Image (cartoon, rainbow, N blue to C red):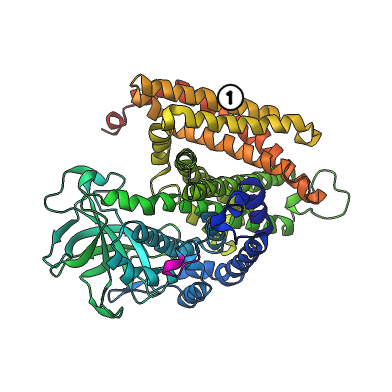
Amino acid sequence: MYRAPVDEIGFTLKHVCGLGDLQSNQSHAELGDDLVDAILTEAGRFASEEIAPLNSVADEHGTPLSDGKVSTPPGWRELYHAWIEGGWNGLTASPDAGGQGLPQMLSVAALEMWNSGSMAFAIGPTLTMGAVEAIEKHASDELQAKYLEKLVSGEWMGTMNLTEPQAGSDLNALKARAERNEDGSYRIFGQKIFITYGDHDLTDNIIHMVLARLPDAPAGTRGISLFLVPKFLVNDDGSLGERNDVKVAGVEHKMGIHGSPTCTMIYGDEGGATGWLVGEENRGLACMFTMMNNARLAVGVQGLGVAERAYQHALGYAVDRKQGRAPGETQEGMSPIARHPDIKRMLLSMKSKTQVARAICYACAHAIDMSNIAEEADSKTFWSERASLLTPIAKALPTDFGVEVASLGVQIHGGMGYIEETGAAQHLRDARIAPIYEGTNGIQSIDLVMRKLPLSGGEHIKGFIQELQEIADEVAASNRSEFGSTAERLAASIEDLREATDYMATAQAEGRVADALSGATPYLRVAGLVLGGALLAKGALRSTSEPAPKLGERTLLARSFCETVLGETAGLKSDILLSAEAIQAFDAEALAS
């Protein structure tokens, strides 16, 4: 069973990732430690006691489609309504719409626990929160008045409709179309695929956020508009009217997250689905990116949540399972496998990678919060750029780690890990989608290299690297022998990152775009690993007031990660600097012919 690591989450928020910066700001003056602890404790209880027990039930049951309706797993509807009654859906939404106005940092911390409880459950409300933000920032007052309060409360849920059979990552190929009506509404036609929670029985209405083109729209992404299309039309008094011309045509049979319905949606089979414009015509992608940017962080949190669940699962098994005799054992009989060095190695890797994923996701949320409350122009620019820099890292590395940690969990279970009864395989199956959707991790790497490194003429990334160097210097100055070679290893990896960054800047300046793109994925991993090592070291440095066992654990995690995993950065740097020519010479089409 899962037990929410509330103390670890609280420590990371307060002492590693800067929650105190928000607590000291007037906009969050009410956010004292007592309130933070109460929110985390109750979120942890709900995730552990209410959500987690239904995870395997949902995995086995799935979301069958019958007579045009999707059914969610047993207990799912009751769970969802208990969740919204707790007020969890509106954590960050504006109080004017019934939300609590809390910072992203707390929302992300709670989201971690929901995903550890069940990734398939948590993804539905995550999309509703994204719809809320898009409507808050871009929709007309009339649309906000009609839809926002019930989305914030969770009475209705929202979706995001981008992908089409021919238009996945490249939205230039999008074909769904919209036609203007005389009353100011629009008729929507087309097919959307891979629509998470596109249909279900959790709420009475579903609010779809749909990308489509107008007849006179410019070509490419500059001609895409965003429309709000409800499953049921809403009367002026807020009651539900007739069924809209939108239906679910199929539910995908997936590798994992079986409790989350992934739907094919058809709009306009009977004359056109009625929708309303969100934002301006032909500016829909900018509106949708409001949902997508936070969704990318939320997907990173999915990787984190599954990693924590897989680690706890493997740890419990390793303590109970007995095989062989560990080195130095003197007592009779077999030893728990948790005492064998190779199992210790895997468990330590799982735990350190999970904590790295947590710290990176929370650091990204902190930057988003700081950009929202900053008043001076320079400060707002800095934190907006920091959030932009961290978002692709926070999406990609935690989701990669989620897969790696879940795979180690299966390995620790041995042959039983390959048997579905133990539950270890589900974590790996669930985690595997996270590096793919909301922009593949390859796309995150391209975004980081091509759009984020040039921020402020390249000065922002330089300042970021210097901040990491200051942490390494602080570790060295601490003279704590238990850190081992943490400072030296961290400093060496920071230098690898600095050299790789210089290479990327030069390649772009010289117009060698293909060279930069060839090294984009290993570059993101270098940046993420170095950031993770620095944040683990920062946690160890800030934990000196904690009890001895916890202090030793934090130092051990930092040391282990920096002395082992950070060794990857030297090889990754070589990959970045040397592999472009071979990559570009490779002709896959010729081999396939």
Q: Residue furthest right?
A: 330
Q: Secondary structure at mark 1?
A: helix
Q: Tell me, yes or no, if residue 485 can be seen here.
A: no
Residue 452, image x and y in percent? 42, 35
Q: Quadrant of the N terminus?
A: bottom right
Q: Is residue 477 left or right of residue 295?
A: right
Residue beneath the point at 81% across and 43% down = 327
The image shows a total of numbered marks equal to: 1
Residue placed most toward the observer, 580 or 410? 580
Residue 130, image x and y in percent? 40, 58
Q: What stretch of residues is rendered in magenta? A: 95-100
Per the image, the residue denoted by label 1 is: 495
Magenta stretch holds residue 554 = no
Residue beneath the point at 82% across and 49% down = 548
Residue 578, image x and y in percent? 46, 20
Task: Count residues near mark 1 (Cα–Cα under 10 Å), then give few for <14, some for 14-19, many for 20+.
Answer: some
Residue 68 occupies which quadrant of the picture? Answer: bottom left
Residue 295, image x and y in percent? 42, 53
Q: Is residue 509 left or right of residue 430?
A: left
Q: Tell me, yes or no, if residue 233 can be seen here.
A: yes
Q: Is residue 171 left or right of residue 432?
A: left
Residue 181 occupies which quadrant of the picture? Answer: bottom left
Residue placed most toward the observer, 229 or 300? 229
Q: Is residue 425 left or right of residue 445?
A: right
Residue 480 occupies which quadrant of the picture? Answer: top right
Q: Quadrant of the C terminus?
A: top left
Residue type, label 1: Glu
Residue placed most toward the observer, 316 or 565? 565
